[in-house]
Image (tube, rainbow, N blue to C red):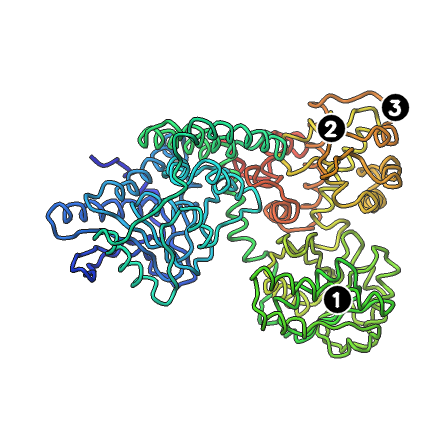
């Protein structure tokens, strides 16, 4: 008897349904395979997803095919997808609207019931992974008896832990019992927490997730022939990573224990999803398939209907929708064409810019600096990075040669004369940047866009020396440039629409998500981090131990503590950022003499030879610590939360960005604010800081994770 999901279906009237289209295929042996193609009837850019209506249709399709199998009409069932996609996973727009734990559990049960029919079809089942397969898409494959993959499939994996949930349609039980516990831990827990890393087709084959790999040109035909061989016994399927008795008796529990300790050291214990996944993977050693699936139902329901699940869906929606349609962006039709890029500076940041621009824009990029030695070193470093990409197989030899030919260096700004875009990466000092742009403006055309990468200086002040300040804006990257997805595009009162439009188009071409901000101190990310770091330094300089600060900020779920962040960005940089904000808002931002002393000393932590922190450096503690009454963890946590709520409220009132969603997007993409926290504003709503400080919340209850 099928699960009653009428209520779920009724709530999904606007679902983009992925249909199950069936056709019979006669295999070379004469056997008949019923091939199910998953297709949402949209253009190839729209991934297929799995919502309630989709799952019900798939369930009904499989029931009909089971009847045909019992009647001897078909000897096998295969499933594949429309071009480039098997399935991108569950339709999170539907999952995020689930109103209760009971409804969330029913969604989990529906997924198990529908996909599980591939395991109990009466004939062998195959899934031909012809493209992207994530989350539920991977679980379609795992529920079948056999799997092939297209060699060009761009991404396979389980992003659920990154999204604040767990693989809940069989993945947490099926995968470890297919490829072993250590491999499953890597795919389900480790990879998602490493910027949501996915697998390539060859990696999936090597792990044993799929049984065979074929090229794109004849992928389906080759997969069908292979399936025919499996059915006829001429093709043997070897799965070397299936766990045996020794792994289950010895390695399994040890691997889980090590993973748990690693997680606690790396991300703390605030995030629930990674630990729920660990518990499921641990239980998969002894649980039956049915019991494993029931455990997944409970875990998924708990997470999906809980605060962190709802916050994660909010964050996912920001990244998938708002980031792709930036608020306040002019029409892209106004953008000017970029045919050459000039970069002022030849150091590390400038070299990262050059590599990104030449790879993505495929136009000549010229760097400049004060002497030829610096220029030559910069150009050599960029070309070496291109060689490294070729060695790793990321680009071909021809591509490497083309990119290197587009890179050049000069000490003469006159070589920027035909550039359409010039960006600086020089010392963070107003006078230095003003001098750079004053000189650049004398040699470039009137249409050339000028961009500053300043992280805290006034873009308006930088442009005050220009004859045409309307073509200047801020274009603030985050380090490392190749990895961090955010660019803050700083729109001054003088910046014209053509300049802003060009910047937004360039950011998109570079593969970055751009958020438009007003020209205010610190823009978004650095202003909020300056508030957090300033409060941390204020606490230690007025008597609160470093360890208490660490524990007080742990509930935010940030990827690192304030003091780890300070060492990462550089103590001198951190001191400069706090100074800038204190100068702008002396009544709200702390002037930290202790941080300047730490910057002169050079470190906060004792570290071992591998760079792992062992504890706080005693001299660093003595340099920063000051007299006063220490705060408790709870007092400091509340102080920081209220300070953030106040500052963000002021930023919104002053129009730094148009909505709290933009602030959250900036922090998720630019500061690694965890998905399961949903950005900072839903968190501040949940803990009551918004109402304590502002008398109102930033969001409605459903968004901030309150039932």
- List x then y, in percent, for residue 593: 88, 36
From this viewpoint, is residue 684 visible? no
Q: Are the two marked residues, 1 and 2, in contact with CB atoms closer than 8 angstroms?
A: no
Question: Mark 3 or mark 1, which is nearer the start of the sequence?
Answer: 1
Q: Which mark is residue 459?
A: none
Proximity of marks 1 and 3: CB atoms separated by less than 8 Å: no
**Label 1 vs label 3, nearer the camera:** 1
**C-alpha span from label 1 to label 2:** 43 Å
Residue 230 position, x and y percent, is 25, 52
Above or below residue 113? Residue 658 is below
Q: Is residue 156 left or right of residue 58?
A: right
- 3D distance between C-alphas at marks 3 and 2: 16 Å
Q: Nearer the viewer, residue 585 or 567?
A: 567
Residue under label 3, please give it.
627
Considering the numbered disc 3 on the image, is that residue within a helix, a strand or a loop?
A: loop
Q: Which residue in the protein does label 1 denote? A: 380
Q: CA distance from mark 1 to mark 3?
A: 51 Å
- Name the residue: 76% across, 40% down: 566
């Amino acid at each position: 008897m099928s699960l009653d999901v009428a209520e779920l279906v009724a709530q999904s009237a606007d679902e983009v349904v992925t249909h199950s289209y069936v056709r019979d295929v006669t295999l070379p042996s004469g056997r008949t395979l019923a091939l199910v193609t998953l297709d949402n009837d949209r253009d190839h850019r729209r991934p297929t997803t799995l919502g309630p209506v989709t799952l019900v249709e798939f369930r009904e399709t499989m029931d009909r095919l089971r009847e045909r199998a019992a009647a001897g009409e078909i000897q096998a069932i295969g499933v594949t997808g429309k071009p480039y996609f098997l399935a991108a996973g569950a339709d999170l727009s539907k999952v995020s609207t689930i109103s209760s734990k009971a409804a969330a559990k029913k969604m989990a049960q529906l997924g198990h019931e529908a996909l599980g029919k591939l395991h109990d079809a009466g004939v062998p089942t195959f899934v031909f992974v012809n493209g992207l397969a994530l989350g539920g898409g991977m679980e379609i494959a795992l529920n079948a008896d056999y799997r092939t993959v297209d060699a060009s499939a761009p991404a396979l994996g389980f992003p659920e832990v990154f999204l604040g949930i767990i693989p809940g349609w069989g993945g947490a039980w099926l995968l470890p019992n297919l490829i072993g516990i250590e491999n499953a831990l890597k795919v389900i827990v480790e990879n998602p927490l490493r910027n949501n890393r996915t697998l390539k087709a060859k990696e999936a084959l090597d792990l044993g997730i799929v049984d065979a790999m074929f090229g794109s040109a004849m992928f389906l035909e080759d997969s069908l022939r292979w399936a025919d061989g499996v059915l006829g016994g001429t093709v043997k399927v070897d799965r070397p990573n299936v766990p045996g008795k020794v792994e289950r008796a010895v390695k399994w529990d040890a691997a889980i224990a090590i993973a748990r300790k690693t997680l606690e050291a790396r991300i703390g214990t605030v995030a629930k999803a990674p630990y729920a996944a660990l518990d499921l993977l641990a239980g998969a050693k002894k649980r039956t398939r049915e019991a494993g699936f029931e455990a997944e139902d409970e875990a998924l329901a708990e997470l999906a209907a809980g605060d962190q699940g709802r916050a994660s869906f909010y964050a996912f929606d920001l990244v998938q929708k708002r980031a792709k349609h930036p608020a306040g962006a002019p029409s892209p039709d106004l953008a000017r064409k970029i045919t050459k890029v000039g970069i002022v500076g030849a150091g590390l940041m400038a070299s990262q810019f050059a590599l990104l621009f030449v790879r993505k824009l495929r136009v000549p990029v010229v760097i400049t600096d004060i002497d030829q030695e610096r220029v030559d070193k910069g150009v050599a470093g960029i070309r070496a990075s291109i060689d490294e990409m070729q060695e790793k197989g990321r680009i071909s030899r021809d591509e490497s040669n083309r990119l290197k030919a587009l890179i050049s260096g000069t000490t003469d700004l006159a070589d920027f004369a035909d550039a359409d875009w010039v960006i600086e990466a020089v010392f963070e000092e107003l006078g230095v940047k003003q001098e750079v742009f004053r000189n650049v403006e004398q040699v470039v055309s009137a249409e050339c866009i000028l961009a500053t990468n300043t992280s805290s200086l006034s873009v308006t002040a930088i442009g005050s020396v220009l004859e045409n300040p309307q073509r200047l804006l801020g274009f603030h990257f985050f380090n490392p440039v190749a990895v961090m997805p955010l660019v803050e595009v700083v729109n001054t009162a003088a910046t014209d629409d053509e300049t802003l439009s060009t910047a937004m188009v360039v950011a998109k071409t570079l593969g970055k998500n751009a958020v438009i901000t007003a020209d205010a101190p610190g823009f978004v990310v650095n202003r909020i981090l300056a508030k957090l770091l300033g409060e941390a330094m204020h606490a230690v300089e007025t008597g609160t131990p470093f360890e208490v600060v660490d524990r007080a900020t742990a509930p935010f779920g940030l990827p690192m503590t304030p003091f780890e962040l300070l060492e990462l960005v550089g103590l001198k940089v951190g001191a400069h950022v706090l100074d800038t904000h204190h100068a702008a808002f002396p009544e709200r931002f702390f002037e930290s003499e202790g941080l300047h002393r730490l910057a002169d000393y050079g470190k906060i932590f004792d570290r071992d030879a591998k760079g792992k922190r062992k504890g706080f450096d005693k001299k660093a503690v003595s340099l920063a610590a000051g007299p006063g009454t220490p705060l408790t963890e709870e007092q400091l946590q509340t102080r920081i939360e209220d300070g953030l709520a106040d500052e963000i409220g002021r930023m919104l009132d002053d129009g730094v960005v148009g909505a709290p969603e933009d602030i959250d997007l900036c922090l998720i993409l630019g500061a690694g604010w965890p998905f399961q926290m949903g950005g900072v504003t839903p968190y501040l709503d949940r803990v009551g800081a918004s109402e304590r400080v502002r008398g109102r919340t930033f969001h409605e209850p459903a968004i901030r994770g309150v039932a």
